[in-house]
Image (cartoon, rainbow, N blue to C red):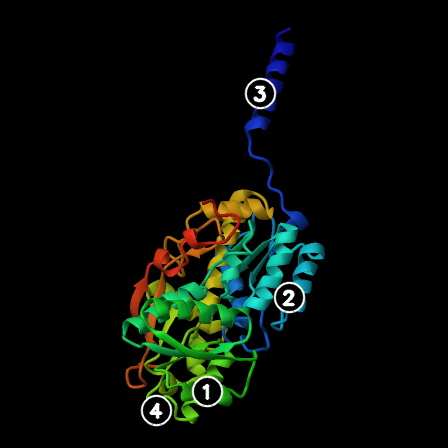
Amino acid sequence: MKTKLATTLAAALLASAALIAPAAAQYAGDGVKIGVLTDMSGAYSDLAGQGSVEAAKMAIEDFGKPIHGKPVELVSADHQNKADIASATARRWYDTENVDAIFDINGSVAALAVREVAKEKGKVDINSGAASMALTNKACSPTGLHWTYDVYSLAAGTGNALANEGYKTWYFITADYTFGHDLEKQVAKIVKEKGGTVKGSVSHPFGSTDISSFLLQAQASGAQIIGMANAGADTINTIKQAREFGITQSGQTLAALLLFLTDINSVGLDAAQGMVLTTGFYWDHDDDTRAFSKRFAARMGGKMPTMVHAGVYSSVLHYLRAAEAAGTDEGAKVVAKMRELPINDMFAKNGKIREDGRMVHDMFLAKVKTPAASKGPWDFYDIVRVIPGDEAFQPLSESTCALVKK
């Protein structure tokens, strides 16, 4: 009788323990698999590209372990800045290759294409390289995050700084796609709020090698500031050709509304000196950024990381920590855990993820050094101001994301 009672009690205790114990970790495909989808061969390959892949590898290495005994894998691909290639790759990765989350996705055309696929599949996409505000507004998703920067933060930094310096008249040279038009619109709004005037704008095709006709229109406008609402190779070509035409020498000022460390390396300090820019990361900011950047450069032939590379590292590392803590690779559950866990790494201190998918962190207003002030290779910036995250990014009160409660 005692034996039977003991057996019954033991069974009850085991059943009770089963009810309160956490469920066994569940990972589709017997592991966690991430993908870096980026521009490997086009206008943005220098600021993202292979550097984004290496940054993701570094994050996996620094995470340093399997997740609940399951391996972490990495795949990468070139989206060629084409929406159809980006969406087809994302669909294949999610459907047949057990990819759990896609990172970087620079270029707004590719980013928005992947976002739609990820939203449909309930999978994770974490953007570091694109700037479109749509990612946290009309295209927001429960499993989609925007990590590094966006056009609001660029305008809040560079646009505000130049307007506060007394520049009143602007003319925009704009890349003719979502990112360029969003950026122009956001900066123009700030210019007008500060009492300035937009004297006009002209749009150029993405990947233009000849910017001369657009520059001549900007020159003829007589505007104090020529705002370059473009990026990557388009920005590099605009700066070089403006110098060749003597536009900057004649008194007009170029405003690079999105400028990367790699762009300055391409055009040289002589051409870029004095430009004001906004960035989410600078390799020489503190001991943590220097340590990371030294490791990155050793893998990349001496090249220092851009904010896109740093954002990929940060987002991959935080994703892996959340996937481990959540005990699953189910998209909604991992992203929920990412919102709970603190974000503190070499890229972001006390970062937070809002309901619209925006990762809020400090940004930096920087000024490009003169050749005489630079102490060596990649010593390009003076940090003028730290822009607090809540000031750098769009207030939730202005969001059009359906996930935001108002």
Name the image quarter holding residue 326. Answer: top right
Q: Give the residue type that dot 3 points to.
A: Leu
Which residue position is annotated with label 2? 86
Q: Are marks 3 and 1 in contact (CB under 8 Å)?
A: no
Which is nearer the N-term, disc 4 or disc 3?
3
- The Cα–Cα distance between marks 3 and 2, rounded to whole angstroms, is 52 Å
In this rendering, position of residue 404 left or right of residue 381: right
In this rendering, position of residue 328 left or right of residue 254: right
Camera-side mark, 3 or 2: 2
Which residue position is annotated with label 3? 13
Q: Secondary structure at mark 3?
A: helix
Rendered residue at 43%/81% (across/down)? 265
Question: Residue 299, relative to residue 72: is it above or below?
Answer: below
Which residue position is annotated with label 4? 249
- The Cα–Cα distance between marks 3 and 1, rounded to whole angstroms, is 81 Å
Which residue position is annotated with label 1? 217
Which is nearer the N-term, disc 4 or disc 2?
2
Residue 379 image offset from top left, x and y in percent: 35, 78
Q: Give the residue type that dot 4 points to.
A: Gln
- The Cα–Cα distance between marks 1 and 4, rounded to whole angstroms, is 16 Å
Q: Secondary structure at mark 4?
A: loop
Rendered residue at 46%/54% (across/down)? 399
Residue 191 image offset from top left, x and y in percent: 36, 71
Which is nearer the N-term, disc 2 or disc 1?
2
Q: Are marks 2 and 1 in contact (CB under 8 Å)?
A: no
